[in-house]
Image (spheres, rainbow, N blue to C red):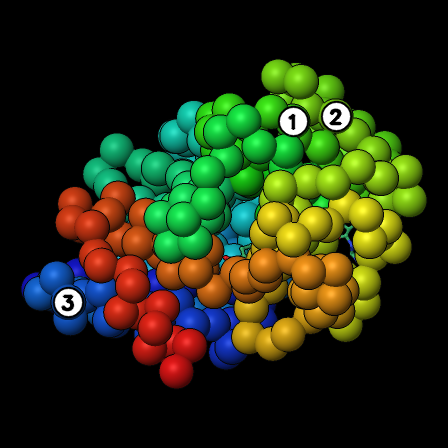
Amino acid sequence: MTDRYAVFGHPIAHSKSPLIHAAFARQTAQDMTYEAILAPLDGFAASVAAFVAAGGRGANVTVPFKEEAYRLASRLTPRAEHAGAVNTLVFGSDGILGDNTDGAGLVADLTRNLQRTLNGRRILLLGAGGAARGVIEPLLDQQPAALVIANRTVSRAQELAEQFGRGVRASGFEALDGAFDLVINATAASLAGELPPLSPRIFTADTLAYDMMYGRDTPFLAFARAQGAATADGLGMLVEQAAEAFHLWRGVRPDTAPVIASLRA
Ligand code: NDP
Protein backbone atom coordinates (compact mmCIF):
# COMPACT_ATOMS: atom_id res chain seq x y z
CA MET A 1 0.00 0.00 0.00
CA THR A 2 1.22 3.51 -0.82
CA ASP A 3 2.53 5.32 2.29
CA ARG A 4 0.84 8.63 3.12
CA TYR A 5 2.52 11.82 4.34
CA ALA A 6 1.20 15.36 4.70
CA VAL A 7 1.97 18.91 5.81
CA PHE A 8 -0.38 20.55 8.34
CA GLY A 9 -0.73 24.33 8.54
CA HIS A 10 -3.14 27.23 8.50
CA PRO A 11 -3.02 28.69 5.88
CA ILE A 12 -1.51 25.90 3.75
CA ALA A 13 -2.51 26.49 0.09
CA HIS A 14 0.77 28.37 -0.58
CA SER A 15 2.95 25.49 0.70
CA LYS A 16 5.66 24.19 -1.63
CA SER A 17 6.19 21.07 0.49
CA PRO A 18 3.92 18.78 -1.62
CA LEU A 19 5.92 19.72 -4.75
CA ILE A 20 9.24 19.19 -2.99
CA HIS A 21 8.34 15.79 -1.53
CA ALA A 22 6.78 14.60 -4.80
CA ALA A 23 10.09 15.45 -6.51
CA PHE A 24 12.08 13.61 -3.80
CA ALA A 25 9.78 10.56 -4.08
CA ARG A 26 10.17 10.40 -7.90
CA GLN A 27 13.92 10.81 -7.65
CA THR A 28 14.37 8.04 -5.05
CA ALA A 29 11.55 5.76 -6.35
CA GLN A 30 9.60 5.80 -3.07
CA ASP A 31 5.99 4.59 -3.14
CA MET A 32 4.36 7.46 -1.20
CA THR A 33 1.94 10.37 -1.42
CA TYR A 34 2.27 13.77 0.26
CA GLU A 35 -0.67 16.15 0.63
CA ALA A 36 -1.35 19.57 2.18
CA ILE A 37 -3.92 19.57 4.98
CA LEU A 38 -5.57 22.74 6.28
CA ALA A 39 -6.09 22.10 10.00
CA PRO A 40 -8.62 24.31 11.82
CA LEU A 41 -6.87 26.75 14.19
CA ASP A 42 -8.47 24.95 17.16
CA GLY A 43 -8.27 21.46 15.64
CA PHE A 44 -4.63 20.57 14.96
CA ALA A 45 -4.48 17.48 17.23
CA ALA A 46 -7.81 16.17 15.89
CA SER A 47 -6.64 16.62 12.27
CA VAL A 48 -3.44 14.74 12.99
CA ALA A 49 -5.34 11.94 14.78
CA ALA A 50 -7.68 11.55 11.79
CA PHE A 51 -4.69 11.36 9.42
CA VAL A 52 -3.00 8.71 11.58
CA ALA A 53 -6.25 6.70 11.76
CA ALA A 54 -6.42 6.81 7.95
CA GLY A 55 -2.93 5.29 7.73
CA GLY A 56 -0.68 8.40 7.74
CA ARG A 57 3.00 7.53 8.34
CA GLY A 58 4.46 10.97 8.98
CA ALA A 59 3.89 14.70 8.63
CA ASN A 60 5.43 18.12 8.46
CA VAL A 61 4.04 20.94 10.56
CA THR A 62 4.14 24.62 9.70
CA VAL A 63 2.79 27.95 11.00
CA PRO A 64 1.06 28.22 13.47
CA PHE A 65 1.23 24.66 14.85
CA LYS A 66 4.94 23.98 15.56
CA GLU A 67 4.64 24.53 19.33
CA GLU A 68 1.45 22.46 19.47
CA ALA A 69 3.21 19.66 17.59
CA TYR A 70 5.98 19.83 20.20
CA ARG A 71 3.37 19.16 22.91
CA LEU A 72 1.61 16.47 20.86
CA ALA A 73 4.72 14.31 20.35
CA SER A 74 5.20 11.45 22.80
CA ARG A 75 8.97 11.43 22.16
CA LEU A 76 11.31 14.23 20.99
CA THR A 77 14.71 14.26 19.32
CA PRO A 78 17.29 16.34 21.24
CA ARG A 79 17.22 19.06 18.56
CA ALA A 80 13.41 19.34 18.82
CA GLU A 81 13.71 19.46 22.61
CA HIS A 82 16.18 22.38 22.34
CA ALA A 83 14.11 24.18 19.72
CA GLY A 84 10.89 23.92 21.74
CA ALA A 85 9.12 23.40 18.41
CA VAL A 86 8.48 20.47 16.04
CA ASN A 87 8.24 20.59 12.23
CA THR A 88 8.41 16.83 11.54
CA LEU A 89 6.32 13.99 13.00
CA VAL A 90 6.81 10.25 12.61
CA PHE A 91 3.81 8.07 13.46
CA GLY A 92 4.74 4.65 14.83
CA SER A 93 3.14 1.85 16.81
CA ASP A 94 4.94 3.23 19.90
CA GLY A 95 3.53 6.77 19.55
CA ILE A 96 4.54 10.01 17.82
CA LEU A 97 8.17 11.08 17.42
CA GLY A 98 8.70 14.85 17.07
CA ASP A 99 11.78 16.28 15.33
CA ASN A 100 12.87 19.72 14.18
CA THR A 101 14.77 19.81 10.87
CA ASP A 102 14.75 23.60 10.31
CA GLY A 103 18.19 24.22 11.84
CA ALA A 104 19.83 21.34 10.00
CA GLY A 105 18.19 22.66 6.81
CA LEU A 106 19.63 26.13 7.32
CA VAL A 107 23.12 24.83 8.11
CA ALA A 108 23.04 22.49 5.08
CA ASP A 109 22.02 25.37 2.81
CA LEU A 110 24.73 27.68 4.20
CA THR A 111 27.57 25.17 4.21
CA ARG A 112 26.80 22.87 1.26
CA ASN A 113 24.81 24.97 -1.22
CA LEU A 114 26.27 28.41 -0.44
CA GLN A 115 29.72 27.07 0.47
CA ARG A 116 30.09 29.21 3.61
CA THR A 117 32.21 28.24 6.60
CA LEU A 118 30.55 28.99 9.94
CA ASN A 119 33.36 27.78 12.18
CA GLY A 120 35.19 30.79 13.70
CA ARG A 121 32.83 33.31 12.03
CA ARG A 122 30.74 36.10 13.58
CA ILE A 123 27.03 35.37 13.18
CA LEU A 124 24.12 37.74 13.80
CA LEU A 125 20.64 36.21 14.11
CA LEU A 126 17.77 38.68 13.79
CA GLY A 127 14.55 37.60 15.52
CA ALA A 128 13.63 35.56 18.59
CA GLY A 129 10.50 33.72 17.39
CA GLY A 130 10.05 30.07 16.48
CA ALA A 131 12.27 30.19 13.40
CA ALA A 132 15.17 31.78 15.31
CA ARG A 133 14.86 29.41 18.26
CA GLY A 134 14.99 26.36 15.98
CA VAL A 135 18.33 27.27 14.39
CA ILE A 136 20.38 28.42 17.41
CA GLU A 137 21.67 25.01 18.54
CA PRO A 138 22.65 23.80 15.03
CA LEU A 139 24.45 27.14 14.42
CA LEU A 140 26.32 26.83 17.75
CA ASP A 141 27.35 23.29 16.80
CA GLN A 142 29.31 24.84 13.90
CA GLN A 143 31.42 26.64 16.55
CA PRO A 144 31.18 30.25 15.37
CA ALA A 145 33.44 32.88 16.99
CA ALA A 146 30.32 34.76 18.11
CA LEU A 147 26.54 34.39 17.93
CA VAL A 148 24.51 37.52 18.67
CA ILE A 149 20.69 37.41 18.76
CA ALA A 150 19.01 40.76 18.09
CA ASN A 151 15.28 41.28 18.43
CA ARG A 152 12.73 44.12 18.43
CA THR A 153 11.63 42.98 21.91
CA VAL A 154 15.08 42.73 23.49
CA SER A 155 13.87 40.71 26.49
CA ARG A 156 12.96 37.80 24.17
CA ALA A 157 16.51 37.79 22.76
CA GLN A 158 17.86 37.86 26.33
CA GLU A 159 15.72 34.88 27.29
CA LEU A 160 17.12 32.87 24.37
CA ALA A 161 20.71 33.90 25.14
CA GLU A 162 20.25 32.77 28.75
CA GLN A 163 18.55 29.53 27.76
CA PHE A 164 21.21 28.48 25.23
CA GLY A 165 24.28 29.85 27.07
CA ARG A 166 27.49 28.84 25.20
CA GLY A 167 28.50 32.52 24.86
CA VAL A 168 25.36 33.63 22.97
CA ARG A 169 24.79 37.39 23.39
CA ALA A 170 21.56 39.39 23.11
CA SER A 171 21.03 42.86 21.65
CA GLY A 172 18.50 45.34 20.35
CA PHE A 173 18.69 46.29 16.65
CA GLU A 174 19.93 49.86 17.21
CA ALA A 175 22.77 48.81 19.54
CA LEU A 176 24.40 46.65 16.80
CA ASP A 177 27.48 48.23 15.28
CA GLY A 178 30.38 45.91 14.41
CA ALA A 179 30.53 43.86 11.21
CA PHE A 180 29.35 40.25 10.91
CA ASP A 181 30.31 37.46 8.48
CA LEU A 182 26.75 36.16 8.37
CA VAL A 183 23.50 38.00 9.12
CA ILE A 184 20.39 35.79 9.21
CA ASN A 185 16.97 37.44 9.11
CA ALA A 186 14.60 35.18 11.07
CA THR A 187 12.13 37.97 11.84
CA ALA A 188 8.68 38.15 10.25
CA ALA A 189 9.49 41.74 9.13
CA SER A 190 10.00 40.65 5.50
CA LEU A 191 6.48 39.20 5.41
CA ALA A 192 5.21 42.73 6.08
CA GLY A 193 7.66 44.27 3.58
CA GLU A 194 9.52 45.95 6.46
CA LEU A 195 13.18 46.37 7.36
CA PRO A 196 14.40 46.16 10.99
CA PRO A 197 16.34 49.35 11.96
CA LEU A 198 19.85 48.07 11.20
CA SER A 199 23.14 49.94 10.92
CA PRO A 200 24.75 49.61 7.46
CA ARG A 201 28.01 48.91 9.34
CA ILE A 202 26.96 45.35 10.22
CA PHE A 203 27.54 44.42 6.55
CA THR A 204 30.81 44.31 4.60
CA ALA A 205 31.64 43.01 1.11
CA ASP A 206 32.45 39.65 2.79
CA THR A 207 29.12 39.36 4.62
CA LEU A 208 26.42 36.91 3.56
CA ALA A 209 22.93 38.28 4.31
CA TYR A 210 20.43 35.42 4.52
CA ASP A 211 16.67 36.00 4.66
CA MET A 212 14.67 32.97 5.79
CA MET A 213 11.78 34.26 3.72
CA TYR A 214 11.70 33.15 0.09
CA GLY A 215 9.76 33.85 -3.07
CA ARG A 216 10.43 37.55 -3.40
CA ASP A 217 13.17 40.13 -2.87
CA THR A 218 12.95 41.72 0.59
CA PRO A 219 13.91 45.15 1.99
CA PHE A 220 16.47 43.33 4.18
CA LEU A 221 18.23 41.74 1.17
CA ALA A 222 18.07 45.01 -0.82
CA PHE A 223 19.61 46.93 2.10
CA ALA A 224 22.39 44.35 2.52
CA ARG A 225 23.12 44.38 -1.23
CA ALA A 226 23.39 48.18 -1.14
CA GLN A 227 26.23 47.76 1.41
CA GLY A 228 28.01 45.34 -0.95
CA ALA A 229 27.04 42.13 0.87
CA ALA A 230 26.20 38.83 -0.85
CA THR A 231 22.60 37.70 -0.37
CA ALA A 232 20.51 34.52 -0.27
CA ASP A 233 16.86 33.76 0.42
CA GLY A 234 15.37 30.86 2.42
CA LEU A 235 14.36 28.60 -0.47
CA GLY A 236 17.42 26.39 0.00
CA MET A 237 16.63 26.07 3.71
CA LEU A 238 13.07 25.04 2.86
CA VAL A 239 14.24 22.27 0.53
CA GLU A 240 17.02 21.13 2.88
CA GLN A 241 14.71 20.88 5.93
CA ALA A 242 12.36 18.82 3.72
CA ALA A 243 15.22 16.53 2.70
CA GLU A 244 16.11 15.98 6.36
CA ALA A 245 12.48 15.02 7.12
CA PHE A 246 12.36 12.75 4.04
CA HIS A 247 15.51 11.00 5.24
CA LEU A 248 13.99 10.46 8.68
CA TRP A 249 10.84 8.90 7.16
CA ARG A 250 12.28 6.90 4.28
CA GLY A 251 15.94 6.30 5.20
CA VAL A 252 17.18 7.73 1.88
CA ARG A 253 18.69 11.15 1.24
CA PRO A 254 17.38 12.90 -1.90
CA ASP A 255 19.56 15.12 -4.09
CA THR A 256 18.36 18.65 -3.27
CA ALA A 257 20.18 20.64 -5.99
CA PRO A 258 17.81 19.81 -8.91
CA VAL A 259 14.76 20.45 -6.71
CA ILE A 260 16.05 23.87 -5.62
CA ALA A 261 16.87 24.69 -9.26
CA SER A 262 13.42 23.70 -10.52
CA LEU A 263 11.64 25.70 -7.79
CA ARG A 264 13.74 28.76 -8.69
CA ALA A 265 12.88 28.33 -12.35
P1 NDP B 1 7.30 34.28 14.84
O1 NDP B 1 5.99 34.95 14.75
O2 NDP B 1 7.50 33.15 15.81
O3 NDP B 1 8.42 35.38 15.22
C1 NDP B 1 8.43 36.61 14.63
C2 NDP B 1 9.75 37.35 14.94
O4 NDP B 1 9.83 38.45 14.04
C3 NDP B 1 9.83 37.91 16.34
O5 NDP B 1 11.20 37.91 16.73
C4 NDP B 1 9.31 39.33 16.16
O6 NDP B 1 9.81 40.27 17.11
C5 NDP B 1 9.90 39.66 14.80
N1 NDP B 1 9.17 40.70 14.05
C6 NDP B 1 7.90 40.62 13.58
N2 NDP B 1 7.60 41.73 12.87
C7 NDP B 1 8.70 42.52 12.91
C8 NDP B 1 9.00 43.80 12.36
N3 NDP B 1 8.11 44.49 11.64
N4 NDP B 1 10.25 44.31 12.58
C9 NDP B 1 11.15 43.63 13.30
N5 NDP B 1 10.92 42.41 13.85
C10 NDP B 1 9.69 41.87 13.66
O7 NDP B 1 7.65 33.84 13.33
P2 NDP B 1 8.63 32.65 12.89
O8 NDP B 1 9.83 32.72 13.74
O9 NDP B 1 7.87 31.39 12.81
O10 NDP B 1 8.97 33.01 11.35
C11 NDP B 1 9.84 34.10 10.99
C12 NDP B 1 10.15 34.06 9.50
O11 NDP B 1 10.92 32.94 9.12
C13 NDP B 1 8.92 34.04 8.61
O12 NDP B 1 9.15 34.98 7.55
C14 NDP B 1 8.89 32.63 8.05
O13 NDP B 1 8.28 32.58 6.80
C15 NDP B 1 10.37 32.32 7.97
N6 NDP B 1 10.67 30.86 8.02
C16 NDP B 1 11.29 30.28 6.92
C17 NDP B 1 11.62 28.93 6.94
C18 NDP B 1 12.31 28.30 5.74
O14 NDP B 1 12.36 27.08 5.64
N7 NDP B 1 12.86 29.08 4.82
C19 NDP B 1 11.33 28.05 8.09
C20 NDP B 1 10.69 28.78 9.19
C21 NDP B 1 10.38 30.12 9.12
P3 NDP B 1 9.08 40.50 18.54
O15 NDP B 1 9.58 39.40 19.43
O16 NDP B 1 9.54 41.84 18.96
O17 NDP B 1 7.59 40.41 18.28
Q: In the displayed structure, does residue 108 sit left or right of residue 102?
A: left
Name which quarter of the figure residue 258 lies in.
Answer: bottom left
User: What residue type is disc 3 on?
Assistant: Gln
> Residue reaching furthest right?
174
In the rendered structure, find residue 115 and report the number of the disc placed on it. none
Question: Dot 1 lies on which element?
Answer: strand
Location of residue 115 in the rendering, given as x and y in whole percent from the top left corner: 41, 48
Location of residue 113 in the rendering, given as x and y in whole percent from the top left corner: 38, 54
In the rendered structure, find residue 169 and report the number of the disc placed on it. 2
Looking at this view, is 185 or 93 the one in front? Answer: 185
Q: Can residue 14 be seen in this view?
A: yes
User: Dot 3 corresponds to which residue?
Assistant: 27
Looking at this view, is 139 or 182 the one in front? Answer: 182
Residue mark closest to the camera, 3 vs 2: 2
Looking at this view, is 259 or 24 the one in front? Answer: 259
Q: Give whichever of discs 3 and 2 has the lower sequence position.
A: 3
